[in-house]
């Protein structure tokens, strides 16, 4: 079965750096035309230039995933530019709240759920209406092992990722057989987002992982590409851990 995306279009949200950029690069290398999004124009433009060196077709659209009008524009312009929308990767995620939940700023918690969960549903609704309900497609939500185990420090983020995992199951049920919906749950991946968790902790931090290293965007990207491909055609509603074996040890760090 094919893992080739020639003639297909993918939208990867929050992809001007980190895991999203890695996913965009992977899908481009397999032949997809790819739209990427991000809030900062300069960084987005730089990412588009980088991705264009693969020789593939890339569109960068600036916008906040939490904004309804921006999501509508992103989906409409993607279909206008590339003529389809076969793959959606809801990768955008934020985590502005740390520590004791009793002290959590509820506006920060609302924002986490809005960007990490509601926006993923919003993008999926739009992709469904614009293309997938008629032509089929695949959606992958980027969750986290924090959605599978408590961490004690990033509780609101973890709860939002748990909601995203459950949303993945609900959508898989409702959108099948036209559209498959899966999620991936990474442990610590060496990106800006998780810098506090890996920077300066290479020696000690990696001991929690059977694979004795932190993850890379490429580790996540190859799994996402597989889940979006025809090779995964009987997999839906699944959340696949990509965590160097961490949860197999029974701990979350
Ligand atoms: N890194 C890890 O260890 C790890 C582990 C498990 C799960 N994850 C998940 O993986 C996903 C990607 O994380 P990452 O580590 O690659 O993060 P990252 O390096 O911080 O990259 C985040 C990307 O999303 C964009 N972005 C952030 N907020 C946005 C918003 N509201 N609207 C649109 N774009 C936005 C950023 O660009 P702008 O800032 O310009 O908007 C950037 O392109 C997230 O869902 C995260 O929860 C990460």
Image (cartoon, grey):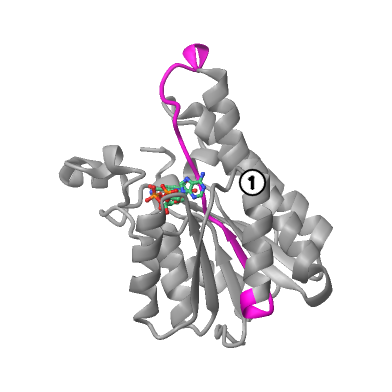
Q: Left or right? Give the position of 33 relative to 139.
A: left
Q: Quadrant of residue 112?
A: top right
Whether residue 181 is visible here, answered yes or no, is: yes
| Residue at image point 57% right, 42% down | 116
Looking at the image, residue 4 lies above or below residue 166? below
| Residue at image point 31% right, 47% down | 192
In magenta segment, residue 83: yes
| Residue at image point 80% right, 56% down | 173
In magenta segment, residue 69: no
Q: Residues within 10 Å of mark 1 (few under 14, many from 20)?
A: many
Residue tagged 1 = 119
Looking at the image, residue 119 lies above or below residue 181? above
Q: Residue 166, position in %: x, y?
A: 69, 44
Q: Is mark 1 within 8 Å of ligand 1?
A: yes
Secondary structure character of the magenta stretch overall: loop
Q: Residue 144, position in %: x, y?
A: 49, 46
Q: Nearer the viewer, residue 203 or 190?
A: 190
Looking at the image, residue 243 lies above or below residue 94? below
How many numbered discs? 1
| Residue at image point 54% right, 68% down | 35
Residue extent of the magenta highlight: 81-104
Whether residue 229 is visible here, answered yes or no, is: no
Q: Mark 1: which secondary structure?
A: helix
Q: Nearer the viewer, residue 185 or 54?
A: 54
Q: Residue 197, position in %: x, y?
A: 29, 39
Q: Quadrant of the C terminus?
A: top left
């Amino acid at each position: 079965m094919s893992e080739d995306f020639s003639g297909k279009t993918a939208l990867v949200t929050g992809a001007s750096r980190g895991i999203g950029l890695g996913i965009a690069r992977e899908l481009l290398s397999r032949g997809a035309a790819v739209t990427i999004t991000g809030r900062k124009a300069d960084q987005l433009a730089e990412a588009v230039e980088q991705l264009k060196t693969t020789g593939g077709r890339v569109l960068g659209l600036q916008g906040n995933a939490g904004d309804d009008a921006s999501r509508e524009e992103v989906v409409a312009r993607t279909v206008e530019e590339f003529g389809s929308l076969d793959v959606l990767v809801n990768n955008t995620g934020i985590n502005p709240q740390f520590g004791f939940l009793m002290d959590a700023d509820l506006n920060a918690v609302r924002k986490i759920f809005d960007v990490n969960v509601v926006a993923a549903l919003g993008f999926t609704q739009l992709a469904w209406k614009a293309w997938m309900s008629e032509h089929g497609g695949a959606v992958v939500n980027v969750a986290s092992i924090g959605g599978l185990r408590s961490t004690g420090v990033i509780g609101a983020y973890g709860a939002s990722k748990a909601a995203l995992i459950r949303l993945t199951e609900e959508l898989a049920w409702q959108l099948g057989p036209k559209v498959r919906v899966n999620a991936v749950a990474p442990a610590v991946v060496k990106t800006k987002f998780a810098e506090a968790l890996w920077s300066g902790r290479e020696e000690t931090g990696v001991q929690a992982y059977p694979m004795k290293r932190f993850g890379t965007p490429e580790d996540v990207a190859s799994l996402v590409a597989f889940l979006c491909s025809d090779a995964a055609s009987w997999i839906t509603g699944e959340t696949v851990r990509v965590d160097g074996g961490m949860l197999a040890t029974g701990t979350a760090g």
